[in-house]
Image: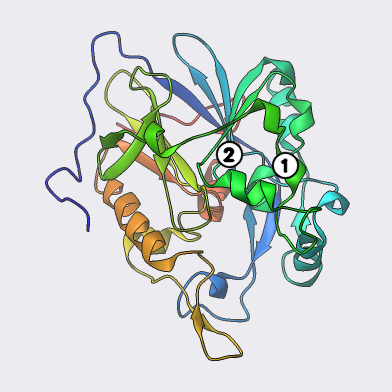
């Protein structure tokens, strides 16, 4: 359970506090059936949602960090299992790739030094990694297993072995998550200055991680929640995580580990009680509609005070 004695506590800024500027990036759209993730949703409802990615720039070093890579325009390069999913249930549309989004804002691909991937599902991790020749990729500790056993070595895998260049990839270990911050017991201070934390977000997929970033010197934050939840109402507690029954009578969930996913959702939901924290999940279509003309790169997401 969440330790309520520290649930709403995030560290105060220090003198000359470093922070990051955060911009949303266009990275494609997917068709998402809400009933897959939201208990009680209309099974016939279909929603077109963004697969949000983000550009972060450190205030002191000016280092460029990208969080997630979105969807590939060329779906033929996906594993057969994913091509089948796209054809049958989850069509994609990519008016602007992650590379095009950065270029539009004046960022050269070779200037991106770090790419943090929330997880290896096709709508988050498989923009074209080759486009970022100088970037180190950062993944959660269990992602390496998915890659080693990915397609084409395993012809049935949902995961593509070539999603990232292994020789330029850092897989965070259990020892890296050595800080507790706010409601989260396991986090990693990426820059070592309290400006950007990578949070262990276990539950949805092996290696799932989130980002908690300080967005000003005045105590504001943003939480980039990846696929922690697929609907804001789950974070607020208005709706429950969906389950379904398989042909053999077993109850299943679209999250890999439902219990751990729900515990993490509760932790993320605790941030909603804090006036200075902005929480964003990757498929928040309502936020996208409200902010697509203002807070996407080269614009930036305003600090929430």
Q: Are marks 2 and 1 in contact (CB under 8 Å)?
A: yes
* Colour convention: rainbow
Q: Secondary structure at mark 1?
A: helix
Q: Residue at position x 33%, y 41% from top?
A: 186
Q: Nearer the viewer, mark 2 or mark 1?
A: 1
In the orientation shown, which residue stands out farthest toward the left? 5
Q: Which residue is mark 1?
A: 163
Q: Residue at position x 16%, y 42% from top?
A: 6
Q: Which residue is mark 2?
A: 117
Give the class, few, some or many, for how many residues have Cα within 10 Å of label 2's Cα (few <14, many ≥20). Answer: many
Q: Quadrant of the C terminus?
A: top left
Q: Residue at position x 77%, y 45% from top?
A: 72
Q: Identify which residue, 128 or 142, lies in the foreground.
A: 142
Q: Secondary structure at mark 2?
A: loop
Q: Quadrant of the N terminus?
A: bottom left
Q: Quadrant of residue 276?
A: top left
Q: Identify which residue, 88 or 193, lies in the foreground.
A: 193
Residue 67: image location, x then y, percent: 56, 34
Tell me which label, 2 or 1, sits earlier in the chain: 2
Q: Is residue 208 placed above or below 175 in the rendered structure?
A: below
Q: Residue at position x 76%, y 39% from top?
A: 96
Q: Identify which residue, 276 or 4, lies in the foreground.
A: 4
Residue 218: image location, x then y, percent: 27, 21
Residue 196: image location, x then y, percent: 41, 26
């Amino acid at each position: 359970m969440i330790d309520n004695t520290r649930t709403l506590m995030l560290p105060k800024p220090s003198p000359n506090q470093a922070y990051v500027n955060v911009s949303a990036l266009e990275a494609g759209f997917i068709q998402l059936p809400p009933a897959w993730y939201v208990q009680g949703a209309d099974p016939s409802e279909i929603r077109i949602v963004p697969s949000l990615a983000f550009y972060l720039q450190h205030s002191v070093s000016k280092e460029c960090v990208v969080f997630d890579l979105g969807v590939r325009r060329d779906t033929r390069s996906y594993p057969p299992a994913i091509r089948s999913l796209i054809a049958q249930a989850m069509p994609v549309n990519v008016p602007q790739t992650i590379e095009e989004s950065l270029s539009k804002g004046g960022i050269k691909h070779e200037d991106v030094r770090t790419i943090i991937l929330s997880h290896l599902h096709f709508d988050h991790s498989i923009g074209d990694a080759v486009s970022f020749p100088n970037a180190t990729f950062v993944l959660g500790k269990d992602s390496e297993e998915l890659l080693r056993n990915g397609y084409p070595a395993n012809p049935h895998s949902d995961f593509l072995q070539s999603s990232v260049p292994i020789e330029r990839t850092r897989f965070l270990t259990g020892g890296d998550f050595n800080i507790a911050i706010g409601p989260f017991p396991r986090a990693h201070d990426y820059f070592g200055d309290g400006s950007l934390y990578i949070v262990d977000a276990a539950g949805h997929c092996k290696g799932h991680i989130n980002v908690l970033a300080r967005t000003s010197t005045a105590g504001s934050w943003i939480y980039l929640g990846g696929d922690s939840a697929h609907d804001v109402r789950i974070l607020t507690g208005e709706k429950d995580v969906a389950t379904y029954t398989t042909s053999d009578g077993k109850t299943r969930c679209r999250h890999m580990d439902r219990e751990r996913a729900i515990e993490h959702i509760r932790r993320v939901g605790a941030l909603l009680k804090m006036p200075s924290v902005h929480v964003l999940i990757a498929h928040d279509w309502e936020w996208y509609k409200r902010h697509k003309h203002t807070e996407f790169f080269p614009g930036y997401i305003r600090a929430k005070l």
